[in-house]
Amino acid sequence: EVQLVESGGGLIQPGGSLRLSCAASGFTVSTNYMNWVRQAPGKGLEWVSVIYTGGSTYYADSVKGRFTISRDNSKNTVYLQMNSLRAEDTAVYYCARDTSGYNPLDYWGQGTLVTVSS
Amino acid sequence: DIQMTQSPSSLSASVGDRVTITCRASQSISTYLNWYQQKPGEAPKLLIYGASSLQSGVPSRFSGSGSGTNFTLSISSLQPQDFATYYCHQSYSTPPRTFGQGTKLETK
């Protein structure tokens, strides 16, 4: 059974750093395109980042230069390192799988809440 | 970047109604258009992919159509569990992979 479990969210002060994890089971992250999508309270979905099977990474302009996506194949886990956090980064962060790079996001985790506030 | 525009932003309907939600892309995306349903407190759920293909397990009252820049999601006979927010999403271009702003379907 495919499963994605995010962790690492919490309350963090502006300017701080946080690392989110997405542990996958039932499939291999390195042979899929793994995404992070976020949703601010009461708002819509915003795509954040993706890591390709070959290791290429892409980011939304809103997080470029501050966030880094990576994966650990031995742990079958994807990460999102978030630095220089701002109030507008407050959101539920979901990880989601795309099997080909042009496919939909067919499996999503339950999300982890990041709150940036002093 | 490709912009996705959904309409309406909200929609009031009754059980048994047929409803249609529209999504427009700022440039052609062929049929690389997906639809998701999200209920409060839950992760989005894939309903339709490739503009018109029904994801496994999704009821047949859901259907999608369109290509190029104009797409629709239809629900043929609304059920109580269908009241939710719906998002379109393009998977055509190199990232960013953009979402529509969402359509909240509410009971009349």
Image (cartoon, rainbow, N blue to C red):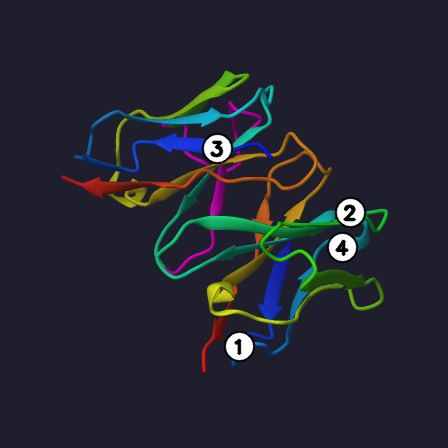
Residue at (58, 54) in percent of width and height: A62
Circle nearer the N terminus (4, 2): 4
Is residue A110 in view from this perspective? no
Q: Are marks 4 and 3 on the same chain?
A: no
Which amino acid, by three-letter code, is at mark 3? Answer: Met
Q: Nearer the viewer, mark 4 or mark 1?
A: 1
What are the residue bounds of the magenta stretch? B41-61
Which quarter of the picture shows residue B49? top right
View extreme (left): residue: B108
- Check disc 4 and report the residue beneath it: A29
Residue B25 x, y percent position in the rendering: 50, 26
Q: Secondary structure at mark 1?
A: loop
Of mark 4 and mark 1, the one earlier in the sequence is: 1
Q: What type is the residue that disc 2 sits on?
A: Tyr
Q: Which residue is mark 3?
A: B4
Label 4 vs label 3: CA separation?
Answer: 28 Å
Quadrant for the C terminus of chain B in the image: top left
| Residue nearest the viewer, comparing A104 with B79 | A104
